[in-house]
Amino acid sequence: MVAILLNMLDIQFIRENSDIVKESQRKRGESVELVDEVLQADKQRRDSLSQYETTRAEQKRIGKTVAAASAEERPAIIARTKELSARVSAFKDAADKATEEYTAAMWKLSNIVEPEAPEGGEDDYVVVKKVGQLRDFAAEGFDPKNHLELGEGVAGIDMKRGVKVSGSRFYFLRGAVARLELAMLTMGVDQAEAHGFIMTTTPTLVRPEIMAGTGFLNSHADEIYRLREPDDQYLVGTSEVALAGMHEDEILDLSKGPLRYAGWSSCYRREAGSAGKDTMGIIRVHQFNKVEMFVYCRQEDSYAQHQNLLAMEQEMLGKVEVPYRIIDTAAGDLGSSAARKFDCEAWVPTQGRYRELTSTSNCTEYQARRLNIRERTEDGSTRPVSTLNGTLATTRWLVAILENHQQADGSIEIPAALRPYMGGRQVIDPVAWEA
């Protein structure tokens, strides 16, 4: 029988609102013609299925008459059933092919962008607000050091040995800086649990179906590490992937509210196409640690949940006391699964600009449709849920913490909220490297 389809978008919505889907594709800078390809493939699929099902029904009806037929009638009936059998087989092949073409076209479509998302590409974001005061290092009487100089000065970041062991864009964190990373991530988990999130450590290897289901095998496929034969698995670049896949093919009970997870994992990114970008330090690396928030909720609650995740990120950034801004990401810079995305970017003094620390995306029903994750409604039917994600803490935060909390002597003042996680320690002092 022809396979049951998992739609990436609601095909009925596309049929009735093709103009909205085309406008979304246009805002993303993606193919508008793809929408017509999907609709044509959908029509061909439905026509092929109708032919198959009609002929199959006729075959069954005539087949039931063979036993009751007379000896004279039976040869003609048997010949007719054989003819219908051949036609059923041909129509089934045609329907299967049409279904494959339809599915392939649907999987190319990105999520429908929220109307409020700005138009344009990477540089066309809208600044929502700025928080915090930038330090005037000139007034303080010294030039700030970059995070790598600071990390090396406290014997906490070792790029040279990271490269020796694993290659470019790898590193060791040591001593108090390693403890600072652990403190930050643990503080993030504590905050998440206080807000009703379930602490979860996740697999960092996933099946191709899970990676594809989250939408990461579209424009970002070249960023992902893949383990081919005999395993055929992917290394995740965020625990969002595993957390989304955790409830694949399940019906969730959301009657008591959203289901919230805080995933702790190591993450891996190839950084393909970033040659020459951020080669110094730990801003753009191949491996890092992260606490990621992930939410399953009812469709009508996704907007409010998105604002909640953004508030969670701001709460964490307030605790580490770094100046930051919030940007509303332009449609052309959204991942394929996101309908809207906000980034929180911290000020990096030695670069004189803001750099991304957190990202929170509302993926509406896009991932849930691909992974067949639903909820039971009041009338007993099911419908796809909405999924959202947001960064709560990650290794890159050390860049902003070290640079914004540095002192003239090269020491780093530990933000007050992190001190209980550092055994009460208030300052990370310069220290000579050990052999």
Image: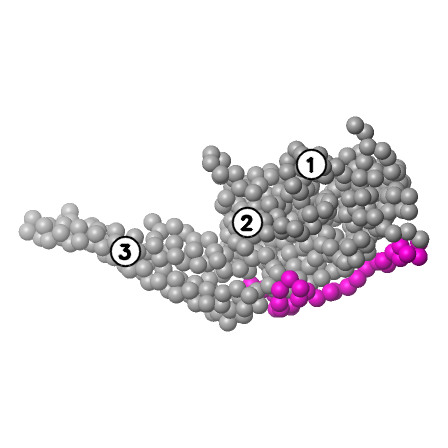
The residue that mark 1 highlights is 162
Residue 422 locus on image (x, y percent): 84, 37
Residue of label 2: 222
Say which amino acid is labelled 3.
Answer: Phe
Does dot 1 land on a helix, a strand or a loop?
helix
**SS of the residue under disc 2:** helix
Instruction: Please tell me whether the stretch drawn in magenta is mainly helix, strand or loop.
Output: loop
Pointer 2 and pointer 1: residues touching (CB < 8 Å)?
no
Q: Residue at x 74, y 42 (%)?
A: 185
337 vs 86, left or right, is right
Separation of residues labelled 2 and 1 (CA atoms): 23 Å
Question: Residue 76: x, y in percent?
Answer: 10, 53
Find disc 3 in the rendering and name its residue: 91
Disc 1 marks a residue whose amino acid type is Gly
Tag 3: Cα neighbours inside 10 Å, few (<14), some, or many (≥20)?
many
Q: Tell me, what colour scheme is on the image?
A: one colour
Measuring from the top left, give residue 107's x and y in whole percent: 47, 56
**The quadrant where residue 346 appears:** bottom right
Determine crowd level at label 1: few under 14, some 14-19, many 20+ residues with C-alpha closer than 10 A: some
Please name whichever residue, 200 or 204, is drawn nearer the observer in this view of the structure. Answer: 204
* SS type, badge 3: helix
Residue shown at the point (59%, 52%) measured from the top left: 273
Q: Earlier in the sequence, mark 3 or mark 1?
A: 3
Give the distance between the C-alpha atoms of the residues marked 3 and 1, in whole angstroms: 59 Å
